[in-house]
Structure formats: structure tokens, C-alpha cells
Image (spheres, helix red, strand yellow):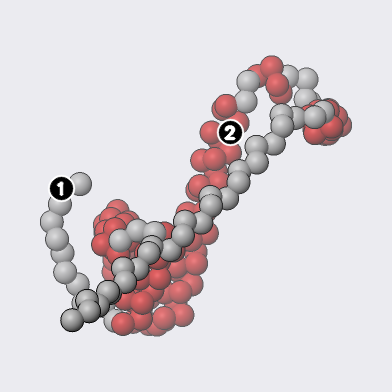
Amino acid sequence: MAGKTLSAHVSEAVVRRVEQIARYEARPVSQVVAAALEFYARLPGETYQSLRTLAALGGDQALDDVARAVARAIVGAEWELATHRLASAIPEAVVAGLDTEEDILGAAVRLTSSPGPEPVVVEPAAESPPPRRRSRRTRAA
């Protein structure tokens, strides 16, 4: 992605949190920061002033409450997207005739009582031996 490097001054607490997120996501810190800035830049203009007002009047608690509300909204949007995609992927023939809860329950019992495909067992990868250390040989004088 072509772009421009930006610089910002943040508290040590923010640095630690961003580093923690980067480790959790197995991504470079720069990608975590870029994702955060891209999200912030998508917010409507009046949101910036509201965030500053919340920080000034409500402090960290108000911002934490907003962050939790945003997190719920994001997870809710992901859920809605997933359910719509799943619903559109189910062929009409599968749901035809499932008009009552009893019909749905009967179909669920039939689907779960028949044996499915053999499970795939994934063996853990064998641990590779540690690298060999070169020994220092001393020459006899």
C-alpha cells in the first residue's frame, strides 16, 4: 500500500497497549497503528469534536464507555453480516417445509443423528531439534 509515514506522540500506556495488540494479532505495530488511524479517519466530522468533549468532561471512563459501545457495534455488525451471508448461502430446498418450530427441530434431529464424514485428525508438527552450536576447538600449540 503506497502511503506516507506519519508520526505521533502517545503515552507509554498507549505504546504498551498497541504493542500488546500487535503481538496478539501477529502484526507489526505500524499495521495496528495504520488500522486505527484508518478507522478514525472514517468517522463523520462531528465525531471528532464529540470525542474531545467526552475526554474533557468525562475523562477516561467516558472514553472507555464509548470504546465498549463501539466494540459492541462492530461485533453486532459482523454478526449481522455473517448471518445474512449464511442465510443467502442456504439453498431454498433445504428450508422448504420448515414452517414451524417442530419442523425445524425435526430437521435438526435428522441432521445431527446421521453419521457425518470421518473427522480429520491433524497431528501436531514434530518439534524441530534446537540448532546445533558450533564448538570452539582449540588448537594444540
Please give left or right for residue 90 compared with residue 138 in the image: right
Provide the residue designation for mark 1.
2
Q: Is residue 36 above or below residue 54?
A: above
Q: Quadrant of residue 121?
A: top right
- Frontmost residue, 130 versus 63: 130
Q: Position of residue 82 (x, y in %)?
A: 54, 40
Kindly indicate whether the residue at mark 2 contacts the one at mark 1 (C-beta within 8 angstroms). Answer: no
Q: Is residue 28 above or below residue 18?
A: above
Q: Secondary structure at mark 2?
A: helix
Q: Secondary structure at mark 1?
A: loop
- Frontmost residue, 29 versus 8: 29
Q: Give the residue furthest to the front.
A: 141
Q: Earlier in the sequence, mark 1 or mark 2?
A: 1
Q: Quadrant of the C terminus?
A: bottom left
The residue at the point 71 percent across, 29 percent down is: 117
The residue at the point 69 percent across, 36 percent down is: 119
